Image (tube, helix red, strand yellow):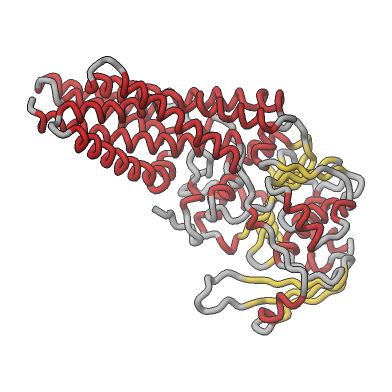
Amino acid sequence: MDAGKRGWPITVSAAFCGCAGAIYVCAFQRTLALVFGEGVYTESVLWAAVLICFSVGGWIGGRAPQSAERILFISAILAGVLGLISNFILGFIAALYAPAYYAVKDHPSLVLLIAFFLGLLSMAGPLMATGAAIFAAGRASAENLESPSSAVGRILAVTLAGGAIGALLPAFLLIPNLGLGKTLVAAAALDFVCAGLLFLSERSRTMKSFTLLFAVFALAGGFLIYPGTRALSFGGWWLPAANLNIHSNEAAYAAARQKSTLIFEENDAAGPIQVYWIKPAENEPAIQRLIVGAKIRGDFLGPGQLIDESLSMLAVVLHPRARRCLVLGLGAGTALTSMRTLMAESDVDCVDDHPALAQVVEKLFYPRFGEIGKGRLIADDPGHFLRVTTDSYDVVLSRPLPPYRDASSAFLFTDDFYRLIGARLSEGGLFAQCVSFSELGGMQRAVVIKTFSRNFPYARIYEVGPGWTVFLGSLSHLARGGRQAIEDIEKAGNKSHAGMMNVLMDEFQIRQMGSHAAASAHTADRPVLEYMGAAGVPVR
């Protein structure tokens, strides 16, 4: 075969290798972030592992004594095979990480070192083989063309172009439709296509037909038998700093109040509270907005703080004998402060991966923040903490952002996250999660309710303000009735909060909506909510 005819299979194979390599990197980074927790240090050590894998593989592919085309073919086959079994390796890594973390948890540098080596172990096979294939493609192209420098430049260009396409495919096509496990299978399929091109370019017509038939059955089998990552109880995502919602003076609301209407005013146990309705402007989304002014210590609470207090009150009323409580995400400190005030004799822990938020809250909002109640403020990724801790809690609170905002928030609505919560609840324990229904479309609501109800058989949904709901779930029967909880809050002197509450859905209605045939469960493997816009329409 002349140089021109020999060159095109190598060039196309390099593009496929670049595309497959980028898909591997995206899928591995996403999956390992679920295991190790997401943060700048974890991300840095994982990227270091990625680059080491590519560099070592490239060094091997560039220096191997065999012919470049043979190295390219073998590397592509190896990358595909190792990519198909990478789900097994990731399952092993997930099981190994928790005991390794506890062995060195008091030494942060060692924790990151373990994450680095476990990440290297999980990614080494496919990425080293891909690196070897890319460099072998450069060698083969240089050997087959008259101008080696031009050949190497062309291979580099098509590899990077393939990598650019591969970086887009997981987000826009593969993960929302196939899930993380099958995304790795798709990358392996591209490696097999690469090897097949090289094989077919050198073989007879009969052998080509046999190879093509074998490839079709092999890929079909790979998609059917893959060990889905959904079976692994992944956990570990971070609550973003956007939860911080601090307004420390009345002037911040002056302009808004000119366009608002006072709809509620009441003196309760905490002090006078005024609730304002703000009509959205014509160019704004039709989302109900609320402002709450509370003249307590000269501060004025934003809508988020009122919701946090309602979240805490419902949890306390439904589980008044709770001894250990957990708040996931510090936010503006309202939920934690409310829980510590209402449950003064209980231990109330808070997990947030932004430890500096405690200083902000104490300085701007609660001068005696550190003196209220008992418990720990733990600087950790909330999902990661749930995965590695052995503690159990009577009450767990969570108030994430809407799931379509980012991957961090989307994970806090997954089947995997709810399973982690259930595993950390003590007997009769209660989980309470605030959900902004006004920012979710109909299909999104069905997905959230379906995912929540399949993990918490005893559930209830309360409306706690215009567009805001609180999901309450337990593995045991909820003793108090729906309206009774609201009446108990009102009897305690919190009329303003109780006046804005309503039972939105009981257990029967939740089960009915959770059985919505068109709604898929939201999992870490296939995060369908993450790829829906505010109207609940899939984003492609």
Q: Where is residue 362 in the image (x, y as percent from the top left)?
A: 81, 57
- Asked whether 329 or 13 is in front, the reply is 13
* Residue that extends furthest to the top in the rendered view of this protein: 65
- Asked whether 263 or 81 is in front, the reply is 81
Question: Is residue 483 visible in the rendered structure shown here?
Answer: no
Residue at image point 13% right, 20% down: 203
Residue at image point 29% right, 20% down: 74
Residue at image point 30% right, 44% down: 161
Question: Is residue 495 visible in the rendered structure shown here?
Answer: yes
Residue 517 sits above or below residue 120 on the image? below
Q: How many marks?
A: 0
Q: Position of residue 122 (x, y in %)?
A: 49, 26
* Residue that extends furthest to the right in the rendered view of this protein: 345
Q: Is residue 490 left or right of residue 129?
A: right
Q: Is residue 155 left or right of residue 522?
A: left
Q: In this view, does 97 lie to the left or right of 157?
A: right
Q: Where is residue 274 in the image (x, y as percent from the top left)?
A: 78, 75
- Asked whether 357 or 440 is in front, the reply is 357
* Residue that extends furthest to the left in the rendered view of this protein: 2
Residue 483 sits above or below residue 422 on the image? below
Residue 457 sits above or below residue 359 on the image? above
Q: Where is residue 434 in the image (x, y as percent from the top left)?
A: 67, 55
Residue at image point 20% right, 35% down: 151
